[in-house]
Image (cartoon, rainbow, N blue to C red):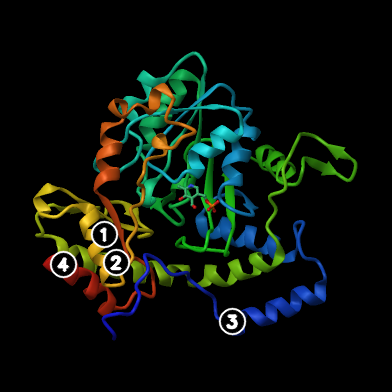
Amino acid sequence: MSENKKITVTSPLLPKLEDFIPMLQDIWDRKWLTNNGHYHQELEKALAEYLGVEYISLFTNGTLPLITSLQALKITGEVITTPYSFVATTHSIWWNGLKPVFVDVDEATGNINPEKIEAAITPHTTAIMPVHVYGTPCNMERIQEIADIYGLKIIYDAAHAFGVRVNGQSILKAGDISTLSFHATKVYNTIEGGALICHDAATKKRIDYLKNFGFADETTVVAPGINSKMDEVRAAYGLLNLKQVDGAIAKRKAVAEKYRAALKDVPGIRYLNDIEGVRHNYAYFPIFVSKEYGISRDALYEKLKEHNIYGRRYFYPLISTFSAYKGLESARPENLPIAHKLADQVLCLPMFAGLSNIDAERVIDIILNKR
Ligand SMILES: Cc1ncc(COP(=O)(O)O)c(C=O)c1O
């Protein structure tokens, strides 16, 4: 394998083209391309079963279910969230005309620190939007306790957490709503796509109206909805990818184990370990580079690039530093020391099902030898 072959941080899980073509033929024959078509219904059923949830609605990406969940639950005022995420989390709050309130994260996981939530609650707070960062489960029990005491809704951004279970239970069962992203870079993808998981039939019905302009029937519009429907082509593609996602997660696990074994005694390099009772999905392999490593995170990032290896500083910069949010009181760096520390240390290494041993070894070699 050439030393110069480009290694990207991720690479999409693709179904076999020869399996997809007959499905495309069938879609052509049916002449029904979107609006709750045959494959859409099949994928909803198959995902509900795979994920172990009862009520799931498909979306056209992973951002619109976040936006729609805030609408569906009629959230007002302020929403407590984390700055250590992808921008879509906070943007969904902003797009609803709500105020995001940032709370610092837990250093061990990168997830919102539940012990800092109460201090951020005001009379205007109505919801909490945590993120299961890198697929690591949040402290869901503690967050629920706080939500119950203060009468708050919880919307989990579970974009990274496809297939993650705690003690055999899907983490998508926590809170009032959870959302998934099926973007091409995710563990499970429908090219672009996403889903919203809720816990009762009435809420699902409302969500399904909202993602289709608010139409309840041909002549009734019950709310100012949006268009966020998944089409038949991507639903069919999604059915094929679902069949191979467990195999892909197993391969990702093998990559994670290889990285961990190789990096375990490197001073200044920390990584996330498996947690007992959790079925992880190995969505990302973040390392956190501290002073003892000898060169900075950015120097390592550049060094990998020199060798045609593209890690990603995910999540850097923090959402709270972007122009739309940096003026918020809760965005002040002194309020978010741990999130800033992680953002300055993190580097996600190449992680995908098709990453070869030789390529993983190239990445490891550079980290070990800093050459
Ligand atoms: C944490 C998080 N939330 C939301 C999203 C948005 O999902 P999408 O790109 O499918 O709109 C992503 C990924 O892109 C994400 O990583």
Could you give the CA–CA distance between mark 1 and mark 3, rounded to whole angstroms?
35 Å
C-alpha span from label 2 to label 3: 32 Å
Q: Which residue is mark 1?
A: 301
Residue farthest along the top direction in this orientation:
123
Q: Does residue 85 lie above or below 160 as drawn?
A: above
Residue at which label 4 appears: 262
Identity, as a three-letter code, of the amino acid under mark 4: Ala
Q: Earlier in the sequence, mark 1 or mark 3?
A: 3
The image shows residue 163 at horizontal and vertical percentages of 45, 57
The amino acid type found where label 3 is placed reads Leu
- Give the Cα separation between the discs numbered 4 and 2: 20 Å
> Would residue 311 be found to the left or right of residue 215 on screen?
left
Q: Position of residue 371 (x, y in %)?
A: 14, 69
Residue closest to the eye, 100 or 111? 100
Q: Amino acid under label 2?
A: Lys
Residue hosting label 3: 17
Q: Earlier in the sequence, mark 2 or mark 3?
A: 3
> Is label 3 in a helix, a strand or a loop?
helix
Q: Give the label, 4 or 2, closer to the camera.
A: 2
Q: Is mark 1 within 8 Å of ligand 1?
A: no
> In the rendered structure, are the residues bearing label 1 and label 4 in contact, judged by CB atoms less than 8 Å apart?
no
Q: Are marks 1 and 2 in contact (CB under 8 Å)?
A: yes
The residue lying at 37 percent from left, 25 percent from top is 117
Image position of 307 (left or right of 10): left
Q: Which residue is mark 2?
A: 305
Q: Are marks 4 and 2 in contact (CB under 8 Å)?
A: no
Residue 234 appearing in the image? yes
Indicate the secondary structure of the residue bearing disc 2: helix
Q: Cα distance, mark 1 to mark 2? A: 6 Å
Cβ of disc 3 within 8 Å of ligand 1?
Answer: no
Name the one closer to the observer, 365 or 41.
365
